[in-house]
Image (cartoon, rainbow, N blue to C red):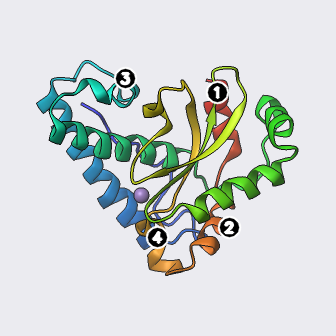
Amino acid sequence: MFTQYQLPYGYDALEPHIDTLTMETHHGKHHATYTKNFNDAVEKAGLGDKTVEEILANLNQVSDEALRKALRNNGGGFYNHNLYFSTLSPNGGKAPTGALAAQIEKDFGSFDALVEKLSTAAATQFGSGWAFLSKKPDGSLVVSQSLNQDNPISEGTGNKPIMCIDVWEHAYYLKFKNLRPDYIKTLFNVIDWELVAKNYEG
Ligand code: MN3
């Protein structure tokens, strides 16, 4: 049984950057539904002994097409939102330090350059999807985009996502309406890079 990431802060804690109603709907409804539907699909597929990473990395081994699609969409939705919500915090917005900071400098030149690259990836993802920052097997970092709930784990590269930006309209439309770039800019005020650094080191 997969359990949804529980926020260590209230739905109103990310105000004024991310509004209460968006957090309540996004975590309490959308993410909860992905989690429930993922658990249903996992049970049907008999994959209860696997981790979500194992399931996402081996989708092509599920022969039933409808079930594979359910695992891909809801497994991705479950995993991506766990990652998204677990790197947000009212204490966010400060630049990373330590090993992650050094790697960012090496791969992107500066933290500001990484923020710009992630922002562009998020802003230019056509339709619903995500931008990801992932750690490659050699420890270097890469920025990517995905459609719908797809996740880098399913690409078979061994890359491990360490943070992500949700650009589905449900992540921002209540407050930012059509202004996705404004939401992305604001989101960086609540991304906690100390938490991202733990994902990088872990
Ligand atoms: Mn979402």
Name which residue type carries label 4: Thr
Disc 2 packing (10 Å; few <14; some 14–19; many ≥20): some
Disc 3 packing (10 Å; few <14; some 14–19; many ≥20): few
Mark identifier at residue 54: 3
Name which residue type carries label 3: Glu
For marks 3 and 1, give the CA distance.
17 Å
Residue drawn at x 77%, y 52% is 94
Residue drawn at x 39%, y 62% is 26
In the image, which is nearer the foreground, mark 4 or mark 1? Answer: 1
Q: Earlier in the sequence, mark 2 or mark 1?
A: 1
Q: Earlier in the sequence, mark 2 or mark 3?
A: 3
Residue drawn at x 61%, y 32% is 199
Q: Are marks 2 and 1 in contact (CB under 8 Å)?
A: no
Mark identifier at residue 122: none
Residue with the mark numbered 4:
20
Q: Earlier in the sequence, mark 4 or mark 1?
A: 4
* Disc 3 element: helix
Residue with the mark numbered 1:
136
For marks 2 and 1, give the CA distance.
26 Å
Q: Earlier in the sequence, mark 3 or mark 4?
A: 4
For marks 2 and 3, give the CA distance.
33 Å
* Disc 4 element: helix
Measured from the top left, where is residue 48 in percent x and y? 22, 23
